[in-house]
Amino acid sequence: MGGVRGESCPANAVEARSAILVAEDEVLIRLEIAEQLRSAGYTVIEAADAHEALELLHHSAGVKLLVSDIQMPGSIDGVALARQVRAEFPAIKIILASGHLLAVAGAEHDGFFRKPFAVAELVNHIRKLID
């Protein structure tokens, strides 16, 4: 089981710029990532698994980026989610996260973070991709 290091991002007094979908089955990890992204000025949508993430993408406008864990419960893991998002929503950037390096094999993505990671590093990478 991976995690996220508790380093915080500086809060920015910036209005919400872009929506980010965070798909993570570990509640505490998802909440920490979402909180830090909101503090950085992003609108965040949260999903507990890949099925919920796809449902949200089909009903949400303005999602610019997906941050997804690779190992999630259900019949769709993060790699399959990334493939489907790339096929259906090619403009959406994809960042994958996992405690296992080999888990990312076969997935097209715009960044990979090995757990545990500093959310501040994730925010900096997101800024480069969508700001």
Image (cartoon, helix red, strand yellow):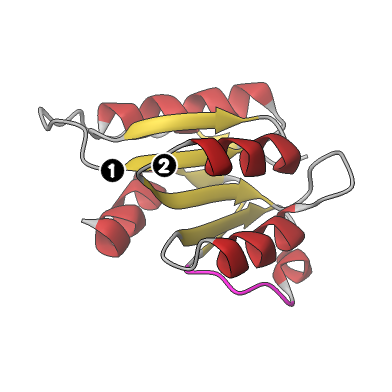
Q: Residue 93: where, in percent of width, then height?
A: 44, 62
Which span of residues is magenta-colored? 106-110
Few, some or many residues within 10 Å of mark 2 (<14, 14–19, 20+): many
The residue beneath circle 2 is 20
Q: Do the residues labelled 2 and 1 touch (CB within 8 Å)?
A: yes
**Closer to the camera in the image, 1 or 40:** 40
Q: Quadrant of the N terminus?
A: top right
Q: What residue type is labelled 2?
A: Ile
Q: Which residue lies furthest to the left in this view?
A: 13
The residue beneath circle 1 is 18
Q: What element carries label 2?
A: strand
Q: What residue type is labelled 1?
A: Ser
Few, some or many residues within 10 Å of mark 1 (<14, 14–19, 20+): some
Q: Give the quadrant of residue 120.
A: top left
Q: Residue 56: where, in percent of width, then height?
A: 57, 35
- Structural distance between the alpha carbons of marks 2 and 1: 6 Å
